[in-house]
Image: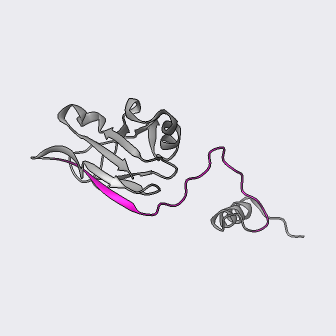
């Protein structure tokens, strides 16, 4: 029987992982259920220019299960922080789990370069208003609201 060396084992594991573990070998399960693939991804630009610091659009209505992709357009650094006190208590944990690059609960990390993105899934999030802001620019009005229908 052929034994794989470390490099061959790594390559086999990589290929198996890319194939989704479909070779009779189950992949380990996570403790948090993965959110479904979003139906629609909406884009919100993060801006800082002669007109001020802002999200565009600042108010966005989306469907349940959609995602929002925040894109740094100018005036970085920016981040996305959901206002914990304004988020329904029963949705805080799921919304936090649906966020990617975070520094703490409901707080996205700072994006410093034009073109950087931050995507939040609203899968398993009930209808309602979800206020958010940019930490470095909150004092100058860089806030927004996502309304899940």
Looking at this rendering, what residue extends furthest in the left direction? 50
Task: Decide whether residue 116 is among the magenta residues.
Answer: no
Residue positioned 34% across, 45% down in the render:
111
Q: Which residues are magenta?
A: 23-48
Give the prevailing secondary structure in the magenta stretch. loop
Asked whether, in this view, residue 144 is left or right of residue 22, the answer is left
Residue 45 place in picture, x, y as percent: 26, 53
Q: Residue at x 69, y 60 (%)?
A: 10
Q: Quadrant of the N terminus?
A: bottom right
Picture quarter containing residue 6? bottom right
Question: How far across and down, in percent of the image, does residue 60 sit?
Answer: 30, 52
In this picture, residue 58 sits left or right of residue 97: left
Establish if 30 lies above or below 84. Answer: below
Q: Position of residue 145 (x, y in %)?
A: 30, 44
Q: Residue at x 72, y 65 (%)?
A: 8
Vertical position of residue 5 compared to residue 123: above or below: below
Whole-percent x and y of residue 64?
Answer: 45, 54
- Magenta span contains residue 38: yes
The residue closer to the viewer here, 53 or 124, is 124
Identify the residue at image location x=24%, y=48%.
58
């Amino acid at each position: 029987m052929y034994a794989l060396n470390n490099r061959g084992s790594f390559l086999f594991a990589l290929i198996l992982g890319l194939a989704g573990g479909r070779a009779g070998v189950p992949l380990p399960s996570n403790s948090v259920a993965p959110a479904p693939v979003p139906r629609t991804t909406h884009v919100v630009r993060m801006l800082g220019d002669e007109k001020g610091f802002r999200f565009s659009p600042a108010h966005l209505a989306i469907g349940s299960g959609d995602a929002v992709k925040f894109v740094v357009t100018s005036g970085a650094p920016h981040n996305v922080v959901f206002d914990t006190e304004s988020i329904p208590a029963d949705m805080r944990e799921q919304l936090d789990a649906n966020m990617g690059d975070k520094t703490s609960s409901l707080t996205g990390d700072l994006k410093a370069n034009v073109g950087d993105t931050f995507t939040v899934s609203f899968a398993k999030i009930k209808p309602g208003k979800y206020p958010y802001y940019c930490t470095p620019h909150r004092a100058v009005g860089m806030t927004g609201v996502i309304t899940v229908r």
